Amino acid sequence: MNKTLKIATRKSPLALWQAEHVKARLEAIHPDLKVELVKMTTKGDQILNSPLSKIGGKGLFIKELEIGMMEGVADIAVHSMKDVPYEIPPGFELGAILKRENPFDAFVSNHYDGINDLPQGAKVGTCSMRRIVQLKAQRPDLEILDLRGNVNTRLQKLDDGEFDAIILACAGLIRLKFETRIKQEIPAIDSLPAVGQGAVGIEIRENDQTILDLISPLIDQETTYRVNAERAMNARLEGGCSVPIAGFATLDGDQLNVTGLVGNVKSGVILKHQVSGHVSEAQALGEELADQLIVMGAKDILKVD
């Protein structure tokens, strides 16, 4: 008997790409499985005139999908890991984290090749507090303006001349076949990525072993170690969308290197630290990194004004 698995997803082009990707992989692994997409609209998709930090953070992109799972409308939900809050609500868990795409930020412009090529006072679009504080550290002269909407909408605003440049995630541009729009892949030293950036995660109902067995072949262990360390740091710092926090882990053999950053957009203060250790200690390394940043004064500069 054919089994049907229902994936809750947002309707944005990138969210649909991610859900279709999971669907294709699951159907390839389980030929007798039928996978359907349940397309939903979230509050984060509906409110486009305010920065996320002011309306409740990135969790706004996943709440309705969780309700869909709770009500049995869907079996799993597919998310960008950078949109998944560090606290998963009771009754749910992360069942799988897939192989990470390019995790870095992208500089996109029709007239300039990189951040350093922008003229004095150029207009740059982004709503990310994390990107803003790092961009200001490099180029305090830039005029940074709010930019919301899906990837296609943001690119259209650039093409309409509203901005001299915009900052997006490389992963989203690559997945939607806009990689030619990337003028500069911004290195981590200039713009440390968001926690989980570039990785796709699958959320499931807690202790749903049947579903876990179906999706477990999709788990990428290296990405899981890296993202778990980043999320552990974020959880310890109690970081949401409204504060500038970056976390990025790399693997060198069985050595995990985790870098964390916290900043304050108003004061321009940035704190940065790195820890290293064995890959099996991913969670503990993320927490140790957060503790070091707290000792350096992270809690004070993260206070939302």
Image: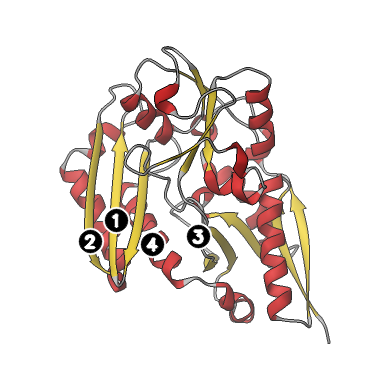
Q: Is residue 51 visible?
A: yes
The reply to whether discs 3 and 1 touch (Cβ–Cβ < 8 Å) is no
Q: Residues within 10 Å of mark 2 (few under 14, many from 20)?
A: some
Q: Which is more N-terminal, label 2 or label 3?
A: 3
Q: Which residue is mark 4?
A: 226
**Image quadrant where one finds the C terminus:** top left
Label 3 belongs to which residue?
100
Above or below for 12 versus 100 = above
Measure the alpha-carbon separation of dots 3 and 2.
20 Å
Counting from the top left corner in percent of width and height, residue 69 is at 67, 62
Q: Callout 1: helix, strand or loop?
A: strand
- Judging from the image, what secondary structure is the residue with disc 2 in? strand
Q: Which mark is residue 276?
A: 2
Check whether the beta carbons of the residues at disc 3 and disc 4 lie within 8 A of each other. yes
How far separated are the C-alphas under marks 1 and 2? 6 Å
| Above or below for 36 versus 214 | above
Quarter holding residue 244: top left
Outermost residue, left side: 295
